[in-house]
Amino acid sequence: MAGGKRTKRKILAAFGVVSALALVISGCSSSSQPAETSNDAGATGGALVIGVTSEPDTLFPWKATQFQAVNVLQNIYGTLTEFDQNLEVVPGLAESWDTSDDGLTVTLHLREGVTFTDGSTFGSEDVKYSLEAMMDEATAAVGAASLSSVDEVEATDENTVTLTMSAPDSSLFANLAPINMAMLSSDDTEEALNTTPNGTGAFELSDRKPSQSLTLARNDSYWGEAAKLDSVEFRIIPDESSIVSAMQSGNVQLATFDDALVAQTAEAANLTVAKTPQLNYHVLQLKATDGPLADVNVRLAIQCAVDRQQVLDTAAMGEGEVTGPITAPAYESDPSSRPCPERDLDKAADYLNKAGLSDGVTINTIVSQGEYSTSVNEAQNLKAQLAEANINIELEVLESGSYVDRWVAGDFEAAVALNGGRPDPDGSYSRYFTSTGNLNKVAGYSSPELDQLFAEGRETSDVEKRKEIYTEISNNLEENAPWIWLFTSYSYTATTSNVTGFTPMANGSLQFLRETSLA
Amino acid sequence: MIHRLFANRIFRRILASLGTLLGVAIVVFVMLRAIPGDQITAGLGTEAAALTPDQRAALEAYYGLDKPLVVQFFSWLGNIFTGNLGFSARSQMGVGAMIAQSLPVTLELAIFSIVLALVVGVPLGMMSASKPDSARDAAGQVVGLAGLSIPAFLLATALVSLLSSAFGFNPNGQAYAGLFTNPALNLKQMLLPSVVLGFGIAAPIMRTTRTAVLEIRSQDFIRTAKAKGVGPRRIQLKHVLRNALVPITTMTGLQFGYLLGGAVVVEQIFSLPGIGRQVLLGIQQKEYAVVQSTVLMIALFFVIVNLLTDILYRIIDPRVRAE
């Protein structure tokens, strides 16, 4: 048995070596860590690290719709107009603009002394090139529809651009602000910009490690006030709870989350968490084109049978606000202005009777699995609530790829969806609810009255008048119930205590990184 | 004579492996196309509904989706033989270069995990087998059971949040450091993921060792050796362990092969830019070239590891060689 003892001793020794090694390695870490994270801070503005779950899917701004890509490109490129923190339109690369009395000629006065990061000067030729390329279908620019009322672009002189319009369009200026309407240099090609962005923004790309990180450096020749930070690194940490841990240990200083649960963990970890209401809205889309849903009474029955607060409470832990159609702060709908502001099962039964469906009705509903965290819970709560009103919704839970395919093709009776809102209500809804809108197939509803109202809204530049028109549109949508609007949720911005000057925005934009610094 | 038989067998194995790889290529290609959605809808999401037919056609041409599937398959396969593994539109890099970056990360992780698993699993298995049904056997078995039943994601998440909140130790929150650019940080970053993975693999290795040792100890040649007066230590190392190495090697090889492709969860949680995460991202983004070529490379390594295991246990055990 002596041999056995010796083996045992060897095993023990092996364990000893391994644990000693572990101790040495972890020992190194705790001593060297603070030095690695706190350098550069202070007078120079510092190097901020933002934790993101995935990397941008493109660096070409005209094709960017993914959140991560938009957030990065927002800081590299410039647009003709911008949004301030209240989502009001403010000058960007266009310093001012005039619209002719008939609304058919728009003159943009460009900011002077703006340069791209490659040193070339920004001017009217670049604007003409950019707008025309976006309007060309071969470019496949996702924002092309924003320019649908522009007939012709003319570079009048070096700093003036004249747009000839087919119809007045007062939403044009808000539609020019998103980053997929970025102004590119007329000398650039998509191929070149895919690897080497060349913008007019407050930062420029300095380093990119695929699936690891993307780093921006301050653009010292930015036309506005130069950014305070020396650099911003978007570090890819795929797991959200790992981002929270990375923030706790000081490796990451800023992150945004959509999931209320993760935000709670961050709060519990002593991070500062700011809640920002989002423009995006959760909705049950009903396709009013055929089947039982073509009858407005059935749609209204559904509207009356849903308690929205209950959906919000059960699916999203109450983290959000019940909403009407328009979420843009300046035009916000009153969520109680609808046929059934509160759940009313008697009224729902009346509507079903009117539709001749007092025995009940069955509606197939598509739900995406994994696209956003609350989808399936929302669907299940809606199913339970509607069942009490004799409305049976059959849930078809789809992997997000199949869901998007079906949704894009308009191949559904009803869909539980999270749709993107925009700061201008025309941008949000004319594409869905006008008969020629490019997403009308998906919405499945339009009417001559809505066509007329949307046209009026575009023609009017008077803000008060526009508010009246969009309130009318909002009421029209509620009374015809093509969709059942549910709620808007929050986005959560977590920061470590040394981050100052960052303002989160309702459209999720990180444009205020240019005013952020590390203390 | 033995050598020629051996070489023949290896040659046949290589041929069979090539067939396997072709099979993998076809299956991956077909399965990827069977998943709903393409690169365009993966990138644009529901915004893809706003594309006009001309815009969609322009995008399909850009991603090469406008060609018939058979043409896509053979042009991909043909390109691979010329060393061109395809291009990732997302990261604007060749897939070959991406694999060259991510494979070493996973390889390093796999080696550390296996070493850790062997260092823990083999002694533990021998300890358990030394006195079956004793308290020490039970202790070993419990450790083995824990390794098998605790999911890697749970252990990983627990370790990350515990160590970072209690001790501020979270090297994986820092930018990934290469083994040769910053060895100290690299080793720190590899520590926890290797522990998580190694713990999971230690369990099957421990069980294999225990079973093998028990079985071998009951065989005639051990009794003969004992009768001839060979000391217990010599029996344990020279006879028992050497023979037990055959199943252990097989198990280790198999686990190593799985690790190359299967470290996805751990790479995701510890944000290691390895090959598993690359496949996962590729699937999410429907980047066909990335997924196809990377999976094929993983299959290739699996095949190579299996082949090496085969050769290795022929060296360890002359009886297998003679078959």
Image: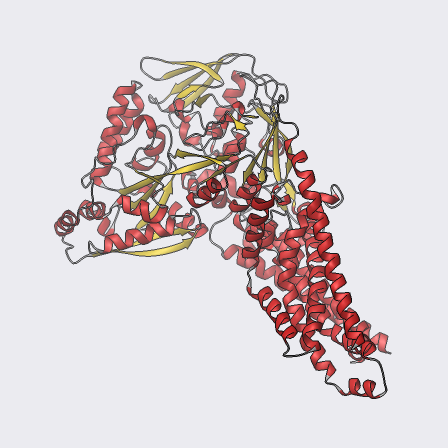
On-image quarter of the C terminus of chain A? top right
Q: Is residue A345 above or below residue A492?
A: below
Residue B177 appears in view: no
Q: Is residue A303 left or right of residue A428?
A: left
Q: How many callouts does the rendering have?
A: 0
Q: Is residue A123 above or below residue A372?
A: above
Q: Is residue B163 above or below residue A17?
A: above
Residue A110, percent from left and from top: 49, 14
Residue B185, percent from left and from top: 70, 43
Residue B66, percent from left and from top: 53, 47
Q: Is residue A508 left or right of residue A392?
A: right
Which residue is depicted at the point 30% across and 27% down?
A331
- Res. A392 image quadrant: bottom left
- Res. A387 image quadrant: bottom left
Foreground residue among B215 and A471: B215
Q: Is residue B323 left or right of residue A497?
A: right
Q: Is residue B303 left or right of residue A79?
A: right
Foreground residue among A456 and A220: A220
Residue B135 appears in view: yes
Residue B283, percent from left and from top: 54, 51
On-image quarter of the N terminus of chain A? bottom right
